[in-house]
Amino acid sequence: MKTYIGILLIALGMMLFNSCKKNEAVALGNPVITPKSEFTAAQFGDSLQFRVEVSDEEIPLSTLKAQLFYSDEMVSETVIRTKTNGEYTGKVFVPFYANIPDGTATLKLVLQNTSLTISEKELEISLTRPDFPFLTLVTASGEHRMDRVGLHEYAATRVFPFSVKGYIKAPKVGTSGNEMTFGWEDNAVAIGSTTEIPFSNSSSGTYSITFNTFSYQASPFIIAYAVNGTVMDRIDDNRFKVDLALSQAQEVTIDGIEDLSNWFVDPDYFSKDANGKLTFLPVGGKYRITANFTLKHFIVEAMNGSGLATLQPDGTGAIWIIGEGIGKPGIATNQVGWNTDNALCMAPIGNKKYQVTGVAGTTFKADNINFKFFHQKGWGGEYKHANISTKSDLIFIGDGANGRDSGNLGIVSGKALEVGATYVFTVDLSAGNDKAVLTVTKK
């Protein structure tokens, strides 16, 4: 029995030995790399052309890889199929990254044959950042030359509107250089993009738009848009928002909007005197103010903590309007409708009362309204006819059988709002959330 086991072990050992010999036999051939180009220096942003002679006298070749490393990180690679011995040419891109100083990169040439045998050759390349003679700011209205004003620093100084959107173009430098673009991605300047950068100044006139090709820092930016000194955050090109605490009768200052006098002033949230001074009207609390540059309108919404306010059991919080026949700054441009994203926050005026003010024919449809009151900005709690009443002889509350769904408001048959007149809709919850009273007053 011992003899039999010994024979098995010897046989197994021979099998393993032969298997190892087979694996070793896979790595055959002798790939040879002979560079034919000088690889001594290049610039960031270059397409570096190389010429290499490759051969293997024993095994057919497979691929030649040109790999560029910044320190230990491979930043670019070109792969060439090498079916036969001979000379091959290609290009490897030298990335133009921000905040990378002049230095030495490594170009690694990796030649592989069909038996997976590899040969490598490393070459050092001195890299420098290109010194562009100028840059170009490309906007919808035309191109503006940005002159070199310092190391890596460029500026276009002339009369600009307060808001300028455009991308920056850098010319080709040197025989291996490429034209490069810088645009706006993820709220920062990024290479390779043509998305417009949202430059803005506090006012129109003569000022400089600048860009640094080393750090990618650009100016001026949207920091000009601020409410009471708090910078507004960008939502998109046309909307900016800020969340802040406001107290009743507090003066509100808005900076950076050149044509502020042309903006709609919501009478539920602000009063405006002859000098343009804005005063906050609702009860004190935290509010979100969204500047909509398309509508030229400040949307104000009550908040609770970091979220939008909802109606609380004690009657505080917020009431929201969703439906047809109402819209700020006007129904022609921004009717609320049944899109909950457009829900309108009624101004909390104190003592558990909420109001919305508007002009018939502008804010309200004069002959047809169909909106209702909700507990939140979205579907969920809502006021139906059983928990809201009115003594108005102009506006009625639907019960599902009188021409409106339960809780929806309508205009009494045969009547209409007076076009051009101002109306105030007030919801009073002082008797309890389920005993809301609607009053409609013509100013």
Image: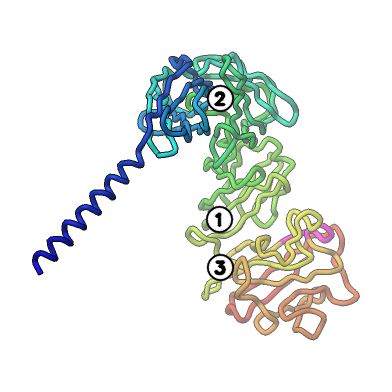
**Mark closer to the chain start, 1 or 2:** 2
Q: Is residue 403 above or below residue 231?
A: below
SS for callout 3: loop
Kind of residue sitting beneath label 2: Phe
**Which mark, residue 300?**
none
Q: Look at 46% across and 29% down and name the residue there.
A: 66
Q: Which residue is mark 1?
A: 287
For disc 3, the neighbor class at 10 Å (few under 14, some 14 to 19, many from 20) is: many
SS for callout 2: strand
User: Which stretch appears magenta?
Assistant: 357-363
Q: Which dot, 2 or 3, sits closer to the camera?
A: 2
Q: Is residue 41 above or below residue 105?
A: above
Q: Position of residue 192 (x, y in %)?
A: 58, 33
Is 379 on the left or on the right of 419, as rendered? Answer: left
Q: Which dot, 1 or 2, sits closer to the camera?
A: 2
For disc 1, the neighbor class at 10 Å (few under 14, some 14 to 19, many from 20) is: many
Q: Look at 54% across and 25% down and name the residue there.
A: 90
Q: Is residue 19 above or below residue 127?
A: below
Q: Look at 66% across and 19% down and name the residue there.
A: 145
**Mark closer to the chain start, 3 or 1:** 1
Q: Nearer the viewer, residue 285 or 131?
A: 131
Q: Is residue 85 above or below residue 338?
A: above
Q: CA distance from mark 3 to mark 1?
A: 13 Å
Q: CA distance from mark 2 to mark 3?
A: 45 Å
Q: Are marks 3 and 1 in contact (CB under 8 Å)?
A: no
**Which mark, residue 211?**
2
Q: Which residue is mark 3?
A: 310
